[in-house]
Structure formats: C-alpha cells, structure tokens
Image (cartoon, helix red, strand yellow):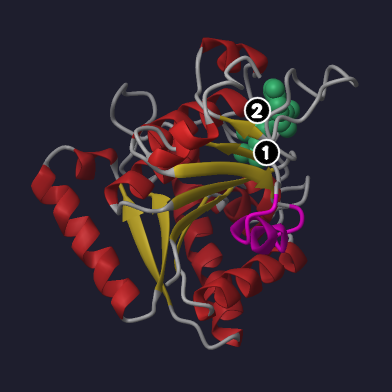
C-alpha cells in the first residue's frame, strides 16, 4: 500500500533567476512523481510559478507591482505552466488535472467535501491533481481572502485530503538552526518532534531569493498546520527531485517534522525539543 502524498514546489525550484522555466528540473520532477505514482502512491502536486512563467512567456524584464497586472500575468502563466506539466507527465503516460482553489473552499464542511470528493475521484482514476491558488480571484490585499502563500495552501490541502505526508520542495536543504545565507556555521536540523517558538526563532523573515515567496517562516507555519492535522511534513531541496525517493524510503533527508497526536511522535519522543 502506498502513501497519499502532497508535494509542493515553489517558483525558485521551477524557474531560473531570470524567471523562465527550468525545463530540465521540471522534467525530472515530473518523472519522479510519475514513478512514485507507478509504485502505488497517490500524489497531489501544489505548484507555484504561474507569474514567473507568465513573465517569461511575455518576455517581461521585471515583475510588475500592480495587483491587476500580476493577476493578468498569473492567468497567462497558469496556462503555460499546465501545458508544460501536461506535456512532461504525458511523456510517461500520466494524466494530470488542474484545480484552482480559493480560501473560500475552506469555509464550510460541504465545500471541503466537494473538493475532497473531486480529488479522491481523480486518485481513483489514477490522475494526478495539480493545485494552485486561483490568483484571478484571490486578492492578497484583503486579509483572509487568500491562503497567503502556497506553503500554507499545500498544508491546508494536505489536511483536507487527509494526506499521510506533505513534502515542501525548497531552494535550501531544510531548516537550519539559523539562516544559512547569513551564517556559514548554520547546521541543518534533520528531525523536529514539535514546532515551538524556539523553532520559529531560527527562521529569518522573508524569502531567500527574488523568486522565493514566503521564506522559512511560512514553511514552518505550513508544517505546523500539517503536523497538527497528524500529517508528517518534510522540507527538502528541490534541486534534485530524486531525493523524494530517498525520503519516502525513510532516509534522513532535509528536515522532517513529526505529526502530532500520533504514536510516532511519542515513540520518537520529545527529548529533542530543544533542537
Ligand atoms: P522557496 O522559494 O523554496 O519556497 P523561500 O525563499 O520562500 O524558498 O524560503 C527559503 C529561504 O528561507 C532560504 O533560501 C533561506 O534563505 C531562508 N531562511 C531563513 N532562515 C532559514 C533557516 N533557519 N533555515 C533555512 N533557510 C532559512
């Protein structure tokens, strides 16, 4: 029996510094996800990248600031992004489906059930759902109107579908005890039994690159949401998507956050709480 796995990939993993798609990496990621599906897992992909891809498609030299322009770009880019996913997954004979969600789906149990039923039906048909926020209607200037970032979207979707595992692919190996971009002696933490304030203090504010979005703090908030829903969560480097195989085989890759209220978190103990 395989696992139900949500994988989140960010813009900095999917694109080059100029904002244009990193085709080689995207192709490798799609191949790995196909293979994980072939071996019996149910995979759902949460993807960012629509604005970056839209910029590349329209050959824009810089990212616009106006919300309506960003939304227009996302609308162009989402099309191209799905076209590429369809092509790469299609190479391995896998079918994908696009789900554009807004935070409103979380408002009632009925709406959540509808989304969950759709995703479960796609899984039954062996189709790989690809989820993004519907940027055309989600306006981040209105508090509470949107998920905020795709890290949180992925955690919410993972809990909605009762996933076994959430894997966030980042531009870094995982959570370090301090920001490794600032401190050369920062150490990677492999296992976090429980996310507390001390853990949040390790993460610096803001994204690590011009294409990164939320930064490590938003990933920790997402990890907290997922683990509180009993879902194991890992942050690993998305540069080598093949690392997903190792992670799922149980090797110590990146940073793994223990699910709460489960046997596993008590088995492994909270003795490392000061990590
Ligand atoms: P992504 O685009 O992969 O979602 P982000 O830029 O949003 O990545 O977040 C990852 C970045 O968070 C890292 O590149 C790093 O610069 C920054 N960061 C801040 N504090 C930490 C920390 N303690 N451990 C790891 N990364 C950190």
Q: Quadrant of residue 254?
A: top right
- Quarter of the rendered image showing ligand 1: top right
* Residue name at image x 51 percent, y 42 percent: 233
Q: Which residues are magenta?
A: 239-251
Residue 136 appears at what percent x and percent y? 36, 46
Residue 42 appears at what percent x and percent y? 42, 68
Q: Looking at the image, which is closer to me, 229 or 249? A: 249
In the image, 156: left or right of 271? left
Res. 204 visible in picture: no
Magenta span includes 242: yes
Q: Looking at the image, which is closer to me, 275 or 147? A: 275
Q: Is residue 141 above or below residue 202?
A: below
Residue found at the very far left of the displayed protein: 110
Question: Label 2 vs label 1: CA separation?
Answer: 8 Å
Tag in front: 2 or 1: 2
Residue on which disc 2 sits: 207
Q: Name the image quarter holding the N terminus.
A: bottom left
**Some atom of ligand 1 lies within 8 Å of the CB belonging to the residue at label 2:** yes
Residue on which disc 1 sits: 211
* Residue name at image x 76 percent, y 67 percent: 24
Helix, strand or loop at label 1? It is: loop
**Some atom of ligand 1 lies within 8 Å of the CB belonging to the residue at label 1:** yes
Q: Is the C-beta separation of discs 2 and 1 under 8 Å?
A: yes
């Amino acid at each position: 029996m395989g696992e139900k796995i949500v994988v989140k990939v960010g813009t900095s993993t999917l694109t080059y510094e100029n904002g244009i798609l990193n085709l080689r990496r995207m192709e490798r990621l799609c191949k790995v996800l196909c293979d994980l599906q072939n071996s019996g897992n149910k995979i759902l992909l949460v993807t960012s990248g629509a604005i970056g891809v839209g910029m590349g498609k329209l050959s824009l030299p810089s990212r616009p600031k106006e919300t309506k322009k960003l939304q227009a770009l996302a609308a162009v880019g989402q099309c191209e992004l799905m076209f590429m996913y369809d092509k790469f997954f299609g190479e391995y004979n896998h079918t994908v489906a696009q789900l554009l969600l807004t935070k409103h789906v979380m408002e009632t149990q009925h709406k959540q059930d509808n989304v969950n039923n759709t995703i479960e039906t796609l899984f039954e048909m062996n189709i790989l759902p690809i989820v993004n926020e519907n940027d055309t209607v989600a306006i981040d200037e209105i508090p509470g109107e949107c998920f905020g970032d795709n890290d949180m979207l992925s955690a919410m979707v993972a809990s909605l579908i009762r996933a076994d595992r959430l894997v966030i692919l980042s531009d870094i190996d995982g959570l370090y005890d301090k920001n490794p971009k600032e401190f050369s002696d920062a150490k990677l933490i492999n296992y976090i039994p429980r996310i507390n304030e001390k853990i949040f203090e390790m993460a610096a504010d803001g994204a690590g690159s011009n294409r990164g979005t939320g930064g490590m703090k938003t990933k920790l908030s997402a990890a907290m949401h997922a683990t509180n829903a009993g879902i194991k969560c890992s942050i690993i480097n998305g540069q080598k998507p093949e690392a997903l195989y190792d992670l799922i085989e149980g090797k110590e890759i990146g940073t793994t956050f223990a699910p709460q209220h489960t046997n596993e978190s008590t088995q492994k103990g909270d003795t490392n709480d000061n990590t």
